[in-house]
Image (tube, helix red, strand yellow):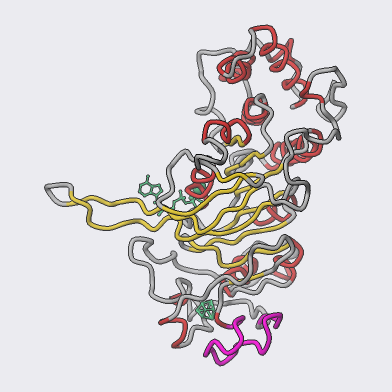
Amino acid sequence: MTATEGSRTASPLSAVDRKDMRDRGGDAQPMLIARELKKHFPITGGVLNRPVGHVRAVDGVSFTVMKGETLGVVGESGCGKSTLARLLMHLIVPDSGELIFDGDAVGESDGLSVRDMRRLMQMVFQDSYSSLNPRMPIEDSISYGKKVHGASEAEAKDAARELLTKVGLDPNLFGPRYPHELSGGQKQRVNIARALVLEPRVVILDEAVSALDKSVEAQVLNLLRYLKQHFNLTYVFISHDLNVVQYVSDRVLVMYLGEVVEIGPVDEIYERPKHPYTQALLASRLSMDPDDRIEEPPLVGDPPNPINPPSGCRFRTRCKFAEKICEVDNPVLGDWATADAHVTACHMFVPRSGHSMAVSSASGSAPAPSGTAMAGGD
Ligand SMILES: Nc1ncnc2c1ncn2[C@@H]1O[C@H](COP(=O)(O)OP(=O)(O)OP(=O)(O)O)[C@@H](O)[C@H]1O
Ligand code: SF4
Ligand SMILES: [Mg+2]
């Protein structure tokens, strides 16, 4: 049986299209709300190993994830995507900020405990091999989490076998195998099955398909889409690949140097990007059409050091629209809390901000992408 055929047994894992009994607030209540999440990693130095600074990896990040949607997260290497994922999972403790899961504050005495939240939210990483125990048959790797949470040996085994089927691997053939006997795509299917065994509501995929060959990547992406629908899942999909993010996402969040610079519906972001950074990122995608290729890279150089980011707007050192106001004032991200909002943190989109190109109303349109949003490429 293939993954797309699925199985129709009586297991709770087969709850196709059934309403999730764990849903509390209905569709209008976001699955996740992150408010002002912050994580600064201390940097030590000198002979006494004293703190000498902080990497501002995630610096006041706010967004919502609606039920059943896929929120894509994009941005250059080091912008804080994985740190954000680990904060959502509480694998690292935020310095400040709040996370609300289906109406419950996570880690608060009257909210959802971190332990319970970790059952409801699972993560799949890029490195499919190191995520699996090399000395454990994959059926045991998948059933392990279920047993830890109190399931009997038989229940856990049944769930593992059913999930192997769901991810397109024959349990009789693949269940007894060890990780080194699987291809990269098969290992990632096992990791996905392992993430689903506790019946989560949210799955965070951090570069989950980035290491796969293109043909295998497409198969795993289709599998993820099928599983999302089958199990009523909500995804946070992190990737540096803008084409993949466009393919899987309902909405997209763009990060730059620890901050959100733009968030909105996927078509809005890809067709009418507002922030000069988003415009440059999109313009830097390789076109399949040779006549459409550009000579000048729209985004050159590395982002500034996150230990000592530029004052005001953090993109100003690379932005060709930068003006005095951008140096002194950090633009805020507009009203990010509504599900269909398309907002950006740029002075050009704040009426009367002091920027010479500022829109006259909050719904004003973006300066046309000109092939480069860079400040002279330096
Ligand atoms: N434990 C840590 N201690 C100190 N700095 C850290 C730590 N973890 C991450 N960082 C730094 O925080 C910043 C954000 O890192 P992060 O891994 O979140 O970026 P990323 O967007 O996931 O990058 P990539 O696309 O390369 O995976 C980087 O400057 C990184 O060096
Ligand atoms: S115009 Fe100013 S605020 Fe907008 S991205 Fe450029 S530097 Fe930042
Ligand atoms: Mg990362």
Q: Residue furthest front?
A: 110
Q: Position of residue 116 (x, y in %)?
A: 57, 32
Position of residue 100 relative to residue 5, above or below, is: below
Q: Residue furthest left?
A: 47
Q: Assign the N terminus to one quadrant of the image.
A: top right
Question: Which residue occupies the foreground of this view, 104 or 51?
Answer: 104
Judged left or right of residue 237, residue 129 is left
In terms of depth relative to the viewer, which is nearer, 2 or 52? 52
- Up-down: is 206 above or below 369? above
Q: Residue at x 48, y 61 (%)?
A: 60
- Where does the C terminus fall, quadrant-wise? bottom left
Q: Which corner quadrant of the image does residue 123 belong to? A: top right
Residue 316 vs 265, above or below: the answer is below
Residue drawn at x 53%, y 35% as measured from the top left: 113
Residue 216: % across, % down: 71, 36
Q: Magenta residues?
A: 348-366
Predominant secondary structure in magenta?
loop
Query: 320 or 109, which is in the foreground?
Result: 109
Q: Nearer the viewer, residue 40 or 184?
A: 40
User: Is residue 334 inside the magenta stretch?
Assistant: no
Indicate whether residue 355 is drawn in magenta: yes
Outermost residue, bottom side: 356
The image quadrant that residue 359 belongs to is bottom right
Q: Seen in the image, is 249 located left or right of residue 77? A: right
Q: How many marks?
A: 0
Picture coordinates of residue 140, whole percent (x, y):
60, 13
Instruction: Find residue 163 and report its horizontal and vertical position in percent.
Output: 73, 22
Residue under the point 58% across and 16% down: 144
Q: Is residue 342 above or below residue 211?
A: below
At horizontal 75% and vertical 69% (from top left) the residue drawn is: 271
